Image: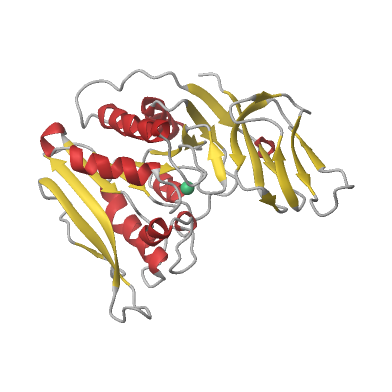
Amino acid sequence: MTRPLRVSTTVDPDAEGKQFGIVNIPHSSDDSAWGAIRLPIVVIRNGSGPTLLFVGGNHGDEYEGPIALSKLARSLEPSAIQGRVILLPALNLPAVLAGVRLSPVDGLNMNRVFPGRFDGSVTEMIADWLLRAILPGCDAVVDLHAGGRTLMFVPFCGIHRLADEAQMARSKAAMLAFGAPISLVIDELDTEGMLDTAVENLGKPFIFTELGGAGMTSARTVGIAEAGVGNLLRHFGLVEGAPAPADTRLMHSPEADCFVIADDRGLFEILVDLGEAVTEGQAVAQVHDIEKPARPPALYRAERNGLVIGRRVPGPTKPGDCLLVLAEDLEA
Ligand code: ZN
């Protein structure tokens, strides 16, 4: 017996033309007994061809994706493409509306609940619907993230290191076509429950971005998102022409020591800035016990040579917080 979908949508994914619709997730709450949460969905189709899925708002405090995809939804006409584009500009809509990383409805991290549950909470139902109703029809998936309120990145487009070399090569080609300032092959700290892993397990190309952060956007980072999405439409053959040539620096974060993790509670002071090169043993951060000014701060050193591509944003810090992310150049 197949599990039923409790989530429904007003769009017909096979229809020609452009459809603005909703994804309806039942949600009975104190302020709406027979209520629902309605995610925006846009399907743009012209004839046969590949299907590209673009996701924004997987985390609610990362805004380049929702903004760039909303703009694309209005500007992209079916006649400009061959194939199908599916846009989910605010996958975790309650989190996007609240401007926070996790869903304020059930406290869950959208990018940690895959494969989801058809009989679960709102976030789990969205994941289950996406996995079963949408992903099977997609040829590639692009998930637009940024650092959120607690992290800031040098804008990059990334893929994960995969065991299947052919699949990784297709993902890598798409990453390079996106044309972000950095193209990063990453070994994630923890991949369980991610949309990334769900798509990769289906054997499909998956690329993601980290375009800035600190819970804000810049003209530059939104521009990178828009240009990258356009490049991918050309790369996958939905739009004619080649991706615009871009200077992208191919890098990787191959080991756990690329992540400088706090071991102390206190006030975080960064000693190197985003985009700076550091050498092994160099002091990169310290954490001050601000109530004990006589006590020297805890000093953190880089455990490898690398470029600082990510940093923590808030000052207050506790053990386990990611302070810095380093990357090194990767031979093409
Ligand atoms: Zn994110």
Residue 295 in sight from this viewpoint = yes
The quarter of the picture where residue 52 lies is top left
Q: Quadrant of the N terminus?
A: bottom left
Q: Residue 298: percent from the left, percent from the top?
A: 81, 43
- Would residue 62 be found to the left or right of residue 328 on screen? left
67 versus 228 height, above or below: below
Q: In the image, what residue occupies the spot 10% across and 34% down? A: 79
Task: Give me the residue at 47% from left, 42% from top.
Answer: 146
Q: Seen in the image, is 109 located left or right of residue 82? A: right
Residue 256, picture quadrant: top right
- Reply above or below: 242 against 258: above
Along the line of sight, the residue nearer the viewer: 70 or 292: 292
Q: How many marks?
A: 0
Q: Is residue 143 visible?
A: no
In the visual, does 82 lie left or right of 293?
left
Q: Of 266 and 202, which appears nearest the observer? A: 266
Place residue 75 in its image quadrant. top left
- x then y, percent, for residue 255: 65, 36
State the residue at coordinates (45%, 51%).
61
Q: Could you tell whether 106 is left or right of 257 in the image? A: left
Colouring chosen for the image of the structure:
secondary structure
Q: Position of residue 144 (x, y in %)?
A: 40, 42
Q: Position of residue 329 (x, y in %)?
A: 58, 22
Residue 308 vs 96, above or below: the answer is: above
